[in-house]
Amino acid sequence: MVTQGLSDGFGRRFPYLRLSVTDVCNFKCAYCLPHGYKKADGPSFLTRQELTCLVRAFVGLGVWKIRLTGGEPTLREDFLELVQDIRGIEGIKNIAFTTNGYRLPQRAAEYYAAGLRAINISIDSLQRENFHSITGHDRLLEVTDGVEASLEAGFESVKINTVLLKGMNDQELGDFIEFVKTRPISLRFIELMQTRDNKSFFDAHHLSGETLVRFLQEQGWVVALPKEGAGPAVEFVHPNSMGKIGLIAPYSKDFCKTCNRLRVSSRGDLHLCLFGEGGISLRDYLQEDRQIDLLQERIFSLLFYKRSTHFLAQGDSGSTSHLAAIGG
């Protein structure tokens, strides 16, 4: 039985698991699934039992933060029951999820009651027509109402994810800053990342995170000290703002030095890097509880193959076809 925490050959430790529970998404975001979700051939998504077994194994290896992703994770019919199962596993300090905000005004309180305490909501524009253009849905008001509902429900951490898009939402930087000024939330801009299927879109709309950094510095924002378990994101604070602005810049120098997370796809493949050369199946070890020692040994041994960095700057996005495939 493996008893030590997860670490790799470069001294990085991994207390954080991003677990995709479905590839299905009901939005059509221009940078991810512009033509909508299309069912792929292959095995089914992990069952609730398999997912719980997987989480238990990772927690036994020192993981204490779990993020449920997709696709859109809340589209799973057993999503609330799955959250309750995971919440009951001893050793978990933080269970979070990422959502497009679908039906969030109606369900935020349910998610909190099930045991979720941190939420990331994707909002790529604060202008209704622009939001519709980027996501394929005219649901901006529903999603922003979901931000308020999440705060009212008592979520300890409410974050907004915004993909930085040249010519599409870069003219709204001031609007986003105003949005967080009166709300205790963190809005994180994410550099657009190239995947196997989006090269032409990437070439047209990628904007370096340095553009945002200069804009924030000109407005008096300063870098905040990172919290426990924080990954590569850099956060900025301002004395006149309740909220924070963050930047996730995967093309920046040394981005991977602070990597602290592993990923498992909705079909049970361990991905050592978002932009690696495919995943390694763990599913054979998820069928019975007595296999947990073998599963942990498998996970532990695979970290030997984790690279020091991705190679996005060299145009190598690995085998990732789109970000919905393994949860982004």
Image (cartoon, helix red, strand yellow):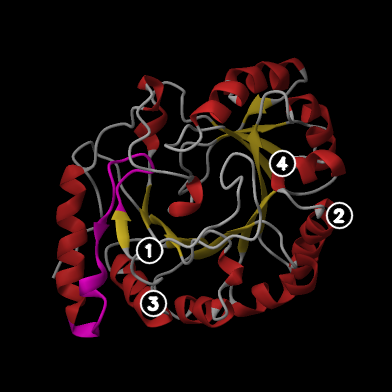
User: Which numbered disc, 2 or 4, marks the residue that appears first in the sequence?
Assistant: 4
Mark 2 to mark 1 CA distance (whole Å): 35 Å
Q: Residue at x 38, y 59 (%)?
A: 265
- Secondary element at tag 4: helix
* Identity, as a three-letter code, of the amino acid under mark 1: Asp
Query: Which of the numbered marks, if any, corresponds to residue 52?
Result: 3
Q: Position of residue 304 (x, y in %)?
A: 16, 45
Residue 289 lies within the magenta run: yes
Residue mark closest to the camera, 2 vs 4: 4
CB-based contact (under 8 Å), mark 3 and mark 4: no
- Secondary element at tag 1: loop
Q: Position of residue 147 (x, y in %)?
A: 77, 57
* Identity, as a three-letter code, of the amino acid under mark 2: Leu
Q: Residues within 10 Å of mark 4 (few under 14, many from 20)?
A: many
Q: Residues within 10 Å of mark 1 (few under 14, many from 20)?
A: few
Q: Residue at x 32, y 71 (%)?
A: 54
Mark 3 to mark 2 CA distance (whole Å): 34 Å
The residue beneath circle 1 is: 41
**Which range of residues does the magenta coloring cover?**
271-290
Above or below residue 102? Residue 190 is above
Residue mark closest to the camera, 3 vs 4: 4
Residue mark closest to the camera, 1 vs 3: 1
Mark 2 to mark 4 CA distance (whole Å): 15 Å
Q: Residues within 10 Å of mark 2 (few under 14, many from 20)?
A: few
User: Which numbered disc, 2 or 1, marks the residue that appears first in the sequence?
Assistant: 1
Query: Which of the numbered marks, if any, corresponds to residue 240?
Result: none
The residue beneath circle 4 is: 134
User: Which numbered disc, 1 or 3, marks the residue that appears first in the sequence?
Assistant: 1
Query: Which of the numbered marks, if any, corresponds to residue 141?
Result: 2
